[in-house]
Image (cartoon, helix red, strand yellow):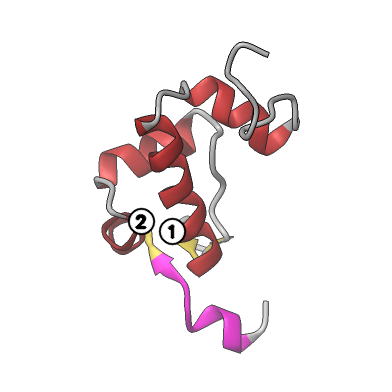
């Protein structure tokens, strides 16, 4: 990992705050496999870059719009759903 990118990494609490979710919510996203940390330190600290923070914000928006987390995960990892189409497709 380049030192430029490393400087922008945030731990769970700060990434959650920047994304507008609770620390517990971010930890839940990690637990269910909806999100992966950008980098894990040698001591096991999960770190997130700005792109990951934006993804957390998107997950929150989609979930608040009525998409279940399971469906959001499918979009991110399997590309099965089309978010611009109707939910009934």
Residue drawn at the location 60% of the way across and 87% of the way down:
3
Q: Quadrant of residue 28?
A: top left
Q: Residue at x 37, y 40 (%)?
A: 27
Q: Secondary structure at mark 2?
A: helix
Magenta includes 8?
A: yes
The answer to whether residue 71 is above or below residue 62 is above
Q: Which residue is mark 1?
A: 45
| CB contact under 8 Å: marks 1 and 2 | yes
Identify the residue shown where x is 41% and y is 51%. 57
Residue 7 appears at what percent x and percent y? Answer: 48, 84
Q: Is residue 30 magenta?
A: no
Where the N terminus falls, by quadrant?
bottom right
Q: Which residues are magenta?
A: 3-10
Image location (x, y in percent) of residue 50: 49, 68
Total numbered labels placed on residues in the image: 2
Query: Residue at position x 28%, y 57% from top?
Result: 13
Q: Which residue, given by chain and number where applicable, does mark 2 sit on?
A: 12
Nearer to us: label 1 or label 2: 2
Q: Position of residue 14 (x, y in %)?
A: 30, 64
Query: Is residue 12 shown to the viewer in this render?
Result: yes
Residue nearest the viewer, comparing 68 with 65: 65
Q: Residues within 10 Å of mark 2 (few under 14, many from 20)?
A: some
Upstream in the sequence, badge 1 or badge 2? 2
**Left-right relation of 64 to 87:** left
């Amino acid at each position: 990992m380049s030192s430029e990118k490393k400087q922008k990494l945030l731990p769970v609490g700060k990434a959650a705050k920047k994304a507008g979710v609770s620390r517990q919510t971010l930890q839940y996203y990690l637990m269910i496999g909806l999100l992966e940390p950008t980098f894990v330190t040698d001591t096991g600290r999960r770190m997130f870059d700005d792109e990951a923070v934006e993804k957390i914000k998107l997950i929150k928006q989609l979930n608040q719009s009525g998409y279940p987390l399971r469906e959001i995960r499918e979009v991110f990892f399997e590309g099965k759903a089309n978010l611009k189409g109707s939910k009934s497709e």
